[in-house]
Image (tube, coloured by chain):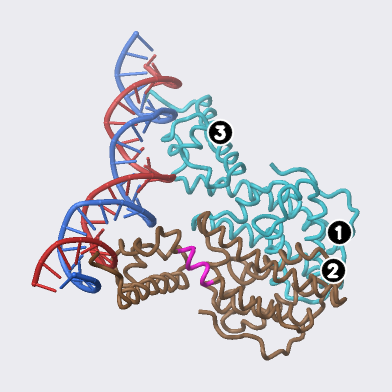
Chain colours: A cyan, B brown, C red, D blue
Amino acid sequence: MAYRQTDKVSARLAETRRGILDAARDLVSEGGFAAAQVSEVARRAGIATGTIYRYFSSKEELCRQIFREVSAQEMDRLALIAASDAPARTRLVEVLQTFAGRAVRGRRLAYALLAEPVDANLAEERAFFRRTHAEIFARILEDGIVSGELPETNVKIAAACIAGAIPTALIGPLAPQSHELDENPDRVVDEIVAFCLAGVGAGLPERKAGKIERRAKA
Amino acid sequence: MAYRQTDKVSARLAETRRGILDAARDLVSEGGFAAAQVSEVARRAGIATGTIYRYFSSKEELCRQIFREVSAQEMDRLALIAASDAPARTRLVEVLQTFAGRAVRGRRLAYALLAEPVDANLAEERAFFRRTHAEIFARILEDGIVSGELPETNVKIAAACIAGAIPTALIGPLAPQSHELDENPDRVVDEIVAFCLAGVGAGLPERKAGKIERRAKA
DNA sequence: CCGGCCCATGAACCATGGTTCATTCCTTGT
DNA sequence: ACAAGGAATGAACCATGGTTCATGGGCCGG
């Protein structure tokens, strides 16, 4: 017995793993999952192609990992807002503005997470991601109905509509021209949010809140 | 010069071409574009793989053709309703109900047209398809605003929201369970439409119109 | 019925991109 | 310093699925 993994080594291994994930994440947020080819990830991480497979059993697993890491961040952020003790209507506005605002500021990444063509496996992760969004929306709507802030509706369907409307209006062929979004993202976001609020009978949003997350995403 | 295409021959050729398109269309509406592999289309059409290439320069062109044929049908149907001289609000309701109703009844095909992962070329066709939807919606909204039936809004954005909300709520991971849609498609459709109408400030829809297109799509 | 040409055939070909593995390089404990 | 592994390498391998092409069969005008 002449070898045992030492701390220094396992630290280096962990670092390499991290490096792979970071390289892959960067590629994804630059060019979507399509850009995260194994050999490209390896190049970016400064290692050999084969080395990837010492850390991840397949490309699929690597991508899944990336998807989870990135999407978890987004979901947590929304969940945090949703869990505040503000009135439902306020939480709704903030959640929608955050969702839309982050999507518009990190469009490439949002595209990868929400709309890019991906294979079955990632589609599963994406389904979870989107269902989580819908649940967050649905719960707030539920609260709003209970508290009388919102009229009765089928919250599941309304939540699905919201979860569909926002990305569609912001990314892909139906989004405004990119320069328009770059110049005045808030206006577009506000209009989309207004549509969704009206859709659930919440009237016009308050257009003043300054504490809402506005930083760029990637 | 000892050969010239005779009518009989060109008829047979046209028939073969049609056969290929039909085979491909059937495959697409059963399993999406992924199921329309060249060799499979050939088998279904009862010809050899290579023969396809005597009629279409590439798979891509074949798929594009299919996409156009199918989507044109859908667009025309909506355009027809949109062009009627009914009040904007009525046209809006009918267009939305038709759109959603047909999507829910031809879900596999709707998935292929609206949501299935496809490559860049088909994505272009899809973009056109979706933009056309949005334009149809937008024009009606415009009319409604001019006539005072609807409040002012950014019609482009509202149209994009609608074009996103309906498919998302009907197909994919955020749609209700399939059996639910099979059992009671109209209820779901009505709720989605209600959301969209409310989104543009058109209040509740009239839930009675019986003349609306309700036949299955595929 | 024949020469010429088009049409159909389907197995071979090719491109892409993920995966493997024999080899080499490093680390560790003695 | 050295033996015994683990870790890294990257070129070869493989699977998938679109595309080609040499070949054979049928249709045309004379």
Question: Magenta stretch?
Answer: B63-70
Q: Earlier in the sequence, mark 2 or mark 3?
A: 3
B68 magenta-colored: yes
> Which of the two marks, 2 or 1, is nearer to us in this view?
2
Residue found at x 38% / y 23%: A2
Query: Badge 3 sits on which subunit?
Result: A
SS for dot 1: loop
Q: Residue A19 carries which label?
A: 3
Residue holding disc 2: A202
The disc label shown at residue B186, or none: none
| Left or right, C26 with reference to A99 | left
**A138 part of magenta stretch:** no
Q: Where is residue B217 in the image (x, y as percent from the top left)?
A: 54, 80
Q: Which amino acid does label 3 sit on?
A: Gly
- Residue B199: quadrant of the picture: bottom right
Prevailing secondary structure of the magenta residues: helix
Residue lying at 84% horizontally and 74% vertically, measured from the top left:
B150
